Amino acid sequence: ILDPDYASEEQEILKRITANIQRLGGRIVRFDDWSQRKLAYSIRKKDKGHYFYIVLEMENEKVPALDKFYRTYEPVLRHMLVRIDRKKKPMERPPEQVIFDEFEGEYA
């Protein structure tokens, strides 16, 4: 999740992120832009963040270096590195936020 205050520099930030993955010997398999969304809770006094979903292949020994990069890179509000079983299908884009009108009627 990227800090929305860096929106004007987003392309340069993404280039740096992908270059770092490649520098560590990783290969990007999938890169999805999930757009800017409201955060479930504030992070560094921000209520919104720009979500990206990256599936990559990388040697296990290099993952701590990638984690440190994300933790120390200012534009990154939050990140999560998860090991995926190759036999399982990667997650699809999340559904758009659904807003329900106030329910009218009786409960069963």
Image (cartoon, rainbow, N blue to C red):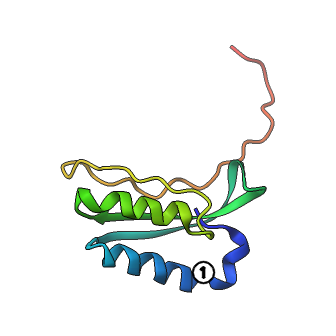
Indicate the position of residue 43 as horizontal and vertical percent values.
Answer: 70, 53
Q: Quarter-wise, where is residue 44 in the image?
A: bottom right
Return the residue found at the far left.
87
Q: Which amino acid type corresponds to the residue marked 1 in the rendered image?
A: Glu
Q: Quarter-wise, where is residue 28 in the image?
A: bottom left
Q: At x 36% / y 73%, what residue is drawn?
A: 21
Q: At x 50% / y 79%, what residue is drawn?
A: 14
Left or right: residue 98 compared with residue 84: right
107 vs 49, nearest the viewer:
49
50 vs 100, nearest the viewer:
50
In the depicted structure, whether residue 88 falls above or below residue 59: above
Left or right: residue 41 compared with residue 32: right
In the depicted structure, whether residue 107 falls above or below residue 68: above
Indicate the position of residue 5 as horizontal and vertical percent values.
Answer: 73, 73
Return the residue found at the far top.
108
Which residue was labeled with disc 1? 10
Indicate the position of residue 22 as horizontal and vertical percent values.
Answer: 32, 78
Q: At x 58% / y 62%, what residue is drawn?
A: 1
In the depicted structure, whether residue 9 falls above or below residue 104: below
Tell me the SS state at disc 1. helix
Indicate the position of residue 7 as horizontal and vertical percent values.
Answer: 68, 78
Q: At x 51% / y 54%, what residue is drawn?
A: 94
Left or right: residue 58 compared with residue 95: left
66 vs 82, nearest the viewer:
66
Which quadrant is the C terminus positioned in?
top right
